[in-house]
Image (cartoon, grey):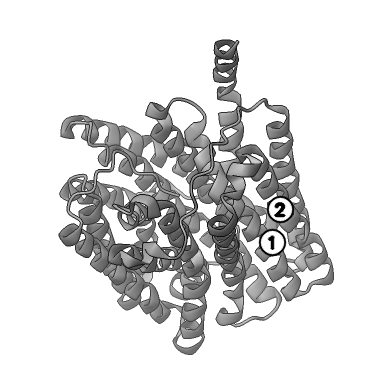
């Protein structure tokens, strides 16, 4: 009887995995829509850069608030998701995110900026719940041996969502639903976000109809206090994660304004280049999954990485409205990414430092140069962001023992960087211009570089069979 039930569940794993993968895609897509909203709302409400960065402040601030609430409940009453079940947790996160999308309708109808910010905060809370539940659930949908493969696959589709969002989302808001005379109007956001809400609810309906196995486990003894903070590498890792998410989000948030300032591009053109920034992260995640897999020989790694890079590059080329000549510079960054991976020799800390160092150089180049060289420099940062989330996360919680879950919660809270860092860069952009404001992410990547060097010295080699990136 039990064996029969297990076999039935196994046959059903493909359908729920495909459904959850669709969820990851939408999750990445809607998150990246913030980069479209920022320049749009800035012009619509005549905002300063500082005021426009409240978009990221509210969205990523919700990650911190949601994670903190979850953490406090967990250490006092036990893990809520373990009690309610992963399926209910995922459904709750989807409904909350869909509600946030629906709130764009009254915000656009009344054309009131604080309502947009409130909608983004609710949307961020929904994605916080999904961040906590969906990744863990994917790892349980099948055998433990293939868990890493499933996680990398779903995270790749999350990155695919962030890649096409600037092109498709930008078309919806800047062109399809904009005013006929080209003027900016809040109503352009109403239909797109209602569509997003509808798709999220459709995914929820699919999940509700699919028979999913229950993965609730016996509650473990609650670890009291803040014992995880006695580990210096965890405290440093939390700060490094804060800087990473802050730096990545800040750069993505300012790319459209940066291209307007340095290249005189309008939003319709810039959105395609923004896709290259996020598409680079997708390429890097595929390459990282292969490079950091210590079970493969160097020869096989090279072949697999070349194949993956070629395939993903062609996908990106088919999405963006750019010629091959306009996108060909990206091949240089892919080649540089190859070299950096092999210099890193599958060591997470060393690879992290190398990638951070490259991004420091690229940011300085973007600040001191002009024209295409500045543009190429800023767009190349995305591909070197790719493995940072997974490597920082892995290194930060290494060797925590019974405090691993507590440390993990603290690292997730550090996503708050996506709320704080863009605000500071927005202030500098108002004072000194967009190009010079990138000194803020320079400091962020310097912190990551030092964290990688610190871990190389004090933690030694941390075994990581595969890179599991995604935020």
**Res 364 → quadrant:** bottom left
* Residue occupied by mark 2: 96
Residue nearer the viewer, 119 or 287: 119
Residue nearer the viewer, 181 or 421: 421
Per the image, label 1 sits on a secondary structure element best described as helix
Label of residue 71 in the image: none
* Residue occupied by mark 1: 122
**Res 86 → quadrant:** top right
Place of residue 39 in the rendered image (x, y in percent of width and height, measured from the top left) = 60, 70
Q: CA distance from mark 1 to mark 2?
A: 7 Å
Place of residue 247 in the rendered image (x, y in percent of width and height, measured from the top left) = 41, 67
Instruction: Please indicate whether residue 91 sits to the left or right of residue 254 in the image.
Output: right
Q: Residue at x 35, y 62 (%)?
A: 376
Q: Residue at x 46, y 74 (%)?
A: 421
Instruction: Please indicate whether residue 165 sits to the left or right of residue 193 in the image.
Output: left
**Res 137 → quadrant:** top right
Place of residue 89 in the rendered image (x, y in percent of width and height, measured from the top left) = 64, 45
Alpha-carbon neighbours of circle 1 within 10 Å: few (<14), some, or many (≥20)? many
Instruction: Please indicate whether residue 386 sits to the left or right of residue 22 in the image.
Output: left
Residue 157, visible in the rendered structure: no
Tags 1 and 2 in contact by the CB under 8 Å rule?
yes
Residue nearer the viewer, 398 or 310: 398
Residue nearer the viewer, 341 or 144: 144
Residue 379 versus residue 219 in the image, above or below: below
On-image quarter of the N terminus: top right
Residue 69 versus residue 324 in the image, above or below: below
Q: Residue at x 74, y 35 (%)?
A: 205
Per the image, label 2 sits on a secondary structure element best described as helix
Q: Earlier in the sequence, mark 1 or mark 2?
A: 2
- Numbered-mark total: 2
Residue 246, visible in the rendered structure: yes
Place of residue 28 in the rendered image (x, y in percent of width and height, measured from the top left) = 55, 49
């Amino acid at each position: 009887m039990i064996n029969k039930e297990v076999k039935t569940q196994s046959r059903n794993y493909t359908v729920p995995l495909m459904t959850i993968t669709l969820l990851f895609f939408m999750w990445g897509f809607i998150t990246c829509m913030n980069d479209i909203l920022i320049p749009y709302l800035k012009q619509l409400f005549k905002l300063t850069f500082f005021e426009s960065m409240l978009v990221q402040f509210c969205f990523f601030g919700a990650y911190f608030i949601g994670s903190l609430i979850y953490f406090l409940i967990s250490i006092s009453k036990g893990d809520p998701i373990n009690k309610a079940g992963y399926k209910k947790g995922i459904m709750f996160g989807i409904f909350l995110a869909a509600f946030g999308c629906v709130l764009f309708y009254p915000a656009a109808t009344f054309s009131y900026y604080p309502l947009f910010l409130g909608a983004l905060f609710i949307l961020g809370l929904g994605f916080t719940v999904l961040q906590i539940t969906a990744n863990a659930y994917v790892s349980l949908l099948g055998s433990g041996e293939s868990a890493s493969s499933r996680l990398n696959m779903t995270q790749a589709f999350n990155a695919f969502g962030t890649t096409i969002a600037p092109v498709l989302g930008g078309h919806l808001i800047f062109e399809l639903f904009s005013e006929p005379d080209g003027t900016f109007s809040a109503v352009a956001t109403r239909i797109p976000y209602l569509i997003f809400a509808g798709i999220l609810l459709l995914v929820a309906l699919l999940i509700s109809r699919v028979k999913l196995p229950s993965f609730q486990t016996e509650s473990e003894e609650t670890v009291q206090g803040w014992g995880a903070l006695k580990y210096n590498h965890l405290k440093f890792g939390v700060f490094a994660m804060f800087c990473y998410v802050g730096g990545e989000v800040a750069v993505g948030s300012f790319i459209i304004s940066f291209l307007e300032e340095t290249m005189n591009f309008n939003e319709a053109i810039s959105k395609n280049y923004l896709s290259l920034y996020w598409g680079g992260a997708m390429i890097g995640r595929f390459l990282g999954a292969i490079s950091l897999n210590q079970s493969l020989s160097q020869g096989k790694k090279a072949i697999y990485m070349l194949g993956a890079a070629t395939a993903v590059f062609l996908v990106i080329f088919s999405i963006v409205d750019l010629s091959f000549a306009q996108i060909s510079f990206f091949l240089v960054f892919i080649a540089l990414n190859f070299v950096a991976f092999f210099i890193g020799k599958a060591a997470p800390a060393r690879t992290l430092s190398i990638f951070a160092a490259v991004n420091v150089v690229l940011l300085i180049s973007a600040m001191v140069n002009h024209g295409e060289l500045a543009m190429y420099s800023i767009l190349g940062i995305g591909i070197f962001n790719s493995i940072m989330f997974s490597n920082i996360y892995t290194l930060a919680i290494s060797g925590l023992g019974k405090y691993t879950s507590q440390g993990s919660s603290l690292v997730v809270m550090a996503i708050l960087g996506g709320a704080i860092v863009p605000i500071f860069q927005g202030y500098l952009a108002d004072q000194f211009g967009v190009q010079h404001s990138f000194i803020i992410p320079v400091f962020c990547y310097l912190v990551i570089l030092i964290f990688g060097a610190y871990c190389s010295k004090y933690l030694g080699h941390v075994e990581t069979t595969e890179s599991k990136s995604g935020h």
